[in-house]
Every structure is written in C-alpha cells, then in structure tokens.
Amino acid sequence: MPQTTLFYQVNFDLFGIFAVASAILFITRRSPVAAALWLVNAMFSLAAMYVMLDAQFVGAVQILVYAGAIMVVFLFVVMLLNLGHADPAGDFRDKKIRFGAGALGVALLAELLVLTNGKVPEVAPSDAPSPNAPMPNAIAPVAQVLFTNHLLAFELTSVLLLVAIVGAVTLAKRKGGARA
C-alpha cells in the first residue's frame, strides 16, 4: 500500500472515529449548548471525510449549511429560550480532558506539517480564478436542479425555519411574561 494511501486511510478512519464519538457525546450531554458544540464537531468531521472522498462541494455545503446556518439558528433558539443553564458535571475543566484536547491539537498540527512538508503553500496570482470563470462542473448541475425542479421545496424550507424562529420568540415571550 503506498504511503499516501495509508495516510489518507488513517486520516479518514480518524475523522470517522471523531464523528461517531462527537455524535455520542452530542446525545449524552445535558446542556443544550454543549450538545450543539459536539454536533458542530461531528459535522466538521463529516465535512473532512467528504473532502477526503473528493467531494469538496458537499464538504463545503456541510460546513456552510449545517455547521454554520443551522447551528446558529439552533443556538439562537437555545439562548432565546434560556435553556443553556450551566452544568458543572458536563463542564470541561478536568485536567485530563484539557491534556487530551491539547494532545489532539498537537497531533493534528503534526499531520498538517507532514502533509505540507513544513512549507506554507504559495498561491500564484495566475492560480486565482477570474471573476468571469464558469462554475465548476460539480456545482452547476446541483444549482440547476435545486433552483428549477426543487425551488418550491427550497423556499418552503426557508419559510419553515422562519416559522420555527417566530414560534421560539412567541414561546419565549409567553415564558418571560408569566414570570413578571
């Protein structure tokens, strides 16, 4: 097995383990904010796996849509409803966990250095795409289908998210008004 294939296989397996562990930690946390952060970690691990499978567009969408937009809405609703009470048992103040997180960070940094051979890649001005360049082949078919055949479902999803936020605001006002 070539060394690069082994390198990618090990990293793919590592991101798979991170995704599964993060998902387990997501469903076992009592604090909704801590659960949301573990869910973001799982989504980033999945995005890294998509990139390693040469599906860069799906990886970017995974980060932008799920780890970005959906989690921001989720955290907005959690904070609006004041569900994020501190849980001392779920807090990461243990020195073992801090050491493990630091060791993981150093390992990921070492992998990055091995991947780039210790050099920062230089981007030549000619490598930058021009503003009038056509869309890559992977994006155009997805955009075409999304904004023609599935436009109604796309718009209904955005309306559904808006209704969920309005409902959360309404519930928060009722909850706050009952206390006063």
Image: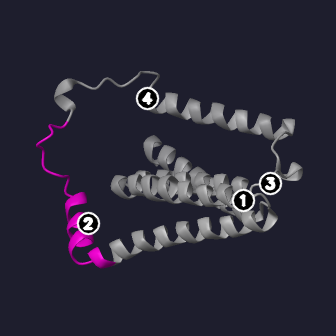
Are discs 1 and 4 less than 8 Å apart at CB? no
- Amino acid carrying mark 3 in the image: His
The image shows residue 42 at horizontal and vertical percentages of 59, 56
* Range of magenta residues: 129-152
Q: Mark 1 belongs to which amino acid?
A: Pro
105 on left or right of 143: right
Mark closer to the chain start, 2 or 3 = 3
Choose the circle earlier in sequence order: 1 or 4.
Answer: 1
Residue placed under numbered mark 3 in the picture:
85
The residue where tag 2 is placed is: 142
Question: Mark 2 falls on what kind of element?
Answer: helix
The type of residue carrying mark 2 is Val
Using the numbered discs, state the Cα–Cα distance from disc 2 to disc 3 in whole angstroms: 41 Å
Residue 110 location (% of width, % of height): 58, 30
Q: Disc 1 or disc 4, which is closer to the eye?
A: 1
Camera-side residue: 163 or 112? 163
Q: Residues within 10 Å of mark 2 (few under 14, many from 20)?
A: few
> Which residue sits at x=44%, y=42%?
4
